[in-house]
Image (cartoon, rainbow, N blue to C red):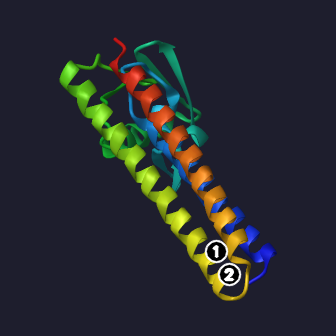
Amino acid sequence: MSAEDVDLAIDIGKEGMEDALEHLGKELIKIRTGKASPSMLSGILVEYYGSPTPLNQVANVGTSDSRTLTIQPWEKSMLAPIEQAIFSANLGLTPMNDGEIIRINIPALTEERRKQLVKQAKHLGEEGKISLRNSRHKIMDAIKQAVKDGYPEDAGKRKEDAVEKIVHDYNDQIDEMIKAKEDDIMTI
């Protein structure tokens, strides 16, 4: 293994770490904080002419106020499938269909529910850190293999130290994301 191979392994590992951060961000958006946000419905698939289609491709999703989501389908025939998809997603939201538009009132969160959501966010953060550790482990294995194959040991040690710093930085970013989400959830 050459220096280029070691650098390539580090780059691939960093991509995995970036993906972990991006995934964590997407998952944290789905945790509702008591405020209406169209992103709360981002993972919902609606049956559209026989194929599952993302909700935002069959309707306009928006907010009318801080506690109400509105869904305006592009075809009136889509009202019932959209309503069914929201129920099926099991988000704890109740859509109200008035024949033109679907409204979803976001209930205020209780203190107990806020604490559950904080636990959920921390769990997602821990999963993100596990993903970082897995990427780190793969990089370290590649560096150790390179040292066995003749890569200078002191250079390998410097690469390992650099990887540890990178992982530490990503861990700090995850901690910041979780802290921000916790603050958002606990704010009334």
Callout 2 amino acid: Ala
Quadrant of the rendering where the C terminus is positioned: top left
- x%, y% of residue 72? 53, 27
SS at mark 2 in the image: helix
Q: Which residue appears farthest toward the front when viewing the image?
A: 154
Callout 1 amino acid: Ile
The quadrant in which residue 34 appears is top left
Tell whether label 1 touches label 2 (CB within 8 Å).
yes
In the rendered structure, the answer to whether residue 122 lies left or right of residue 24 reads: left
Q: Which residue is mark 2?
A: 146
Query: In this rendering, is residue 63 above or below 32?
Result: above
In the rendered structure, the answer to whether residue 20 lies left or right of residue 111 reads: right
Query: In this rendering, is residue 137 above or below 29?
Result: below
- x%, y% of residue 136? 55, 63
- x%, y% of residue 31? 39, 34
Disc on res. 160:
none
Disc on res. 143:
1
The quadrant in which residue 104 appears is top left
Q: CA distance from mark 2 to mark 1?
A: 5 Å
Q: Residues within 10 Å of mark 1 (few under 14, many from 20)?
A: many
Of residues 127 and 81, the one nearer the viewer is 127
Of residues 110 and 177, the one nearer the viewer is 177
Residue beneath the point at 39% across and 45% down: 124
